[in-house]
Image: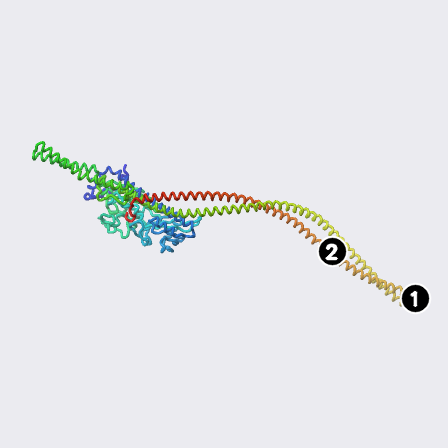
Amino acid sequence: MLKSQQMNLSNSERSWLPYFGKCGRLAMGWACHLNQWRYPILEEIFDSIATTRVRILSEWAEQKWSSLSGISAQIAHDWPKFDAEILAENMRLDGDFSELFVINAQGVTLYSSCRSRVGKNDLDAKAVKLGLADKFLHGPYLDPATGALGATSSRFHDAVTLMFYYPLQKDGVLLGAVCGRVPNDVLGDLIQREAGHIFHESGDNYLFMVKAGFDTAIKAGAALSRSRFEDATFSMGDNLKQGVRTDFGVVSVRNHTEFELIFNDPATGQLHPGVRETIRCGENTFVTYPGYSDYRHIPVIGRGITFTLPGSIDSWGMMCEADLEEVYRFRSLNFRMMSVYLVMWVAMVAVISGIAVIFKPDAQVMAGICGGLFLTGGLVLHRFVARPVGQRLRSMVSVVRNVAEGHGNLSQRLDRGDASRDEAGVLSQWINSLIDNIDRTVGNVRRGTDGMVNNQAHMDVRNKEATAATGEVLIAVQDILQALEKQMSDIELANLTTSEMRQAMQLATDRARAQVTMVQSRTQDIRESIKASSLRIRSLGESTEKIGEIAEVIKGIADQTNLLALNAAIEAARAGEFGRGFSVVADEVRKLAERTSSATHEINLMIASVQDKARDAVAIMEHGASGMEEGLRLAEASAADNSGSAEIIERMFTTISQISMSAAESGSKVQGVARTADSMSAAVGELNFAIASNREGTQKLRLLVNQFQITDVHNQ
């Protein structure tokens, strides 16, 4: 079952052709009837054209992403240093970019292959945001900067732009993005490669919007690529800039096909059936009578397909079409030869019959006439059928032979002006397409080879630097090993010393502990002696206080006796002679009382002095006892501190042992590094040899590729 039968066409769309004219029902109906056996072949042809173009576009986009990824990795490696040669070199290697530049997170241009654009901040903020998050393809869109920068690999140029954004990161930190600006006509050339058109008069491959994911203002069916009929470069008749005249008005564009043209049928003002059904179904194929009306209101056939380019959030469609009249202009060699043969036979039969009826010649004359007519017929067949076919085949053989020999000119093509409308003409078209594909492939290989040569030159320089650095690393590792061996010797000596120190410290610690124990025992005896002395002194103080009390009693008795003696003396004086003896006694008693009172006073003074000294002694003893207690506590604390010091010293010994083990382990690792450095040095040597071999192979490939003469990209 043909795919064409699945296309949803209304009754009016199936009967829209006029009856007469070059593209009328009669002419096209007869042409399609004669070529209906080609329907499956044409479906395969248009499917192959569409699939190949989509593959070319996807591979082209992936190639751009690969280039930007490499640029991003190079820039991130040296960041914050920047080598402007990175952008310049990649501009030379990839002729599609009109600008390579680096932006920061705010969209400001930090570095650019076009110095005048450094510092610019004219990018779409939404596009910058998406481009910083992930790789993002913005476009096509209008950018005056692209128009000002000029054409690149395409001979056509305007302000329509494709912008590639690739995030620039280092150690997970976002630095900005690497951007690549490509004129949109470069994309158009990929699908409109002129020599690749099988139907060179009317074939057209164009892109249109299916669903806009970024700029929703772009309508479905809007043109996204340059039409082959935009200007007079390839158009055999009217073109869009001059205006395509139809019965329903003039279809035209002012500056470029992109965005200005919506692929509508002029008769309805709605999307023409090919674009409409492709958007509705995701794909569409139609190659049978009566075709469908395109945006020029001309019957066409072809295939539509939808796709999304890597990095884009828009859904695009592509139509690969050709005019119904050109496609079915084909007449097979069998049809042509049989037509000429039948005409000749009819003519010969008519001539022979007429001669026989009118002149009635004899048999010999008739035989001569028939022979002459047959010879004339053969000459006619040779002149108008066989010789043209042979000439076309010889020209094809000549072109193919030049290509097959490897020294041919891939820019040469078979002359389409001489192409017939039969199998030979179709064969010449496919040979042109084949050579065109080889031309494009060899051109890509040549440019890739040039890039490989440049990369190998850089690799050679870097590898020499790596070789020198590896030698320096090897020398440094040897120095480290020597220093480490000396350090290991010192550490081993330190280990022996620490073992002796540990034994001495253990002995000193044991002695200190014994001395502290003895001091604690002696200090306990001193505590008890001080306590007993303090108690005795306090008892002495109490006794002196009691003596003072007794002295006070004696003083009171002496004072009383002195008073009594005074009274007795007074009474004795009154008694006169009789009381003289008593007076003497009373006087002695008084004197004794006075001496007793004086002695008692002295005793009190002495007791007071003794009490003061006893109190001082008690205070001194208590202060001494307090100092002794503090000293004992300090001694005990010192003993405890000595224990802590021992623990610290023990930890120090453990640390030294660990250092020794770590040093031994480091030595082992450094030896491993030395072995690795040796291996790396050997690997670098092998890499140098491999690079040299690869360089020779690349040069051979370059010489082989340069044997072909390819088409200039600006004249494709």
For this view, does 36 lie left or right of residue 673? left
Mark 1 or mark 2: whose residue is earlier in sequence: 1
Q: What is the x, y in percent for residue 75?
A: 41, 50
User: Number of marks in the image?
Assistant: 2
Q: Where does the N terminus fall, quadrant-wise? A: top left
x then y, percent, for residue 643: 64, 47
Disc 1 residue type (three-letter): Phe
* Frontmost residue, 401 versus 32: 401
Q: Does residue 401 lie above or below 125 as drawn?
A: above
* Eye-nearest disc, 1 or 2: 2
For the point 44% across and 46% down, the residue is 467
Image spot of residue 145 (x, y percent): 33, 54
Numbered label attached to residue 578: 1
Position of residue 628 measured from the top left corner of the image (x, y, whole percent): 70, 53
* Residue to which mark 2 is pinned: 618
Taking the view exactly as shown, the residue that stands out farthest to the top is 363
Between residue 294 and residue 154, name the one nearer to us. Answer: 154
Q: CA distance from mark 1 to mark 2?
A: 60 Å
Could you say whether the residue bearing mark 2 is in a helix, strand or loop? helix
Q: Classify mark 2: residues with Cα within 10 Å, few (<14), some (14-19) or many (20+).
A: some
Q: How is the image coloured?
A: rainbow
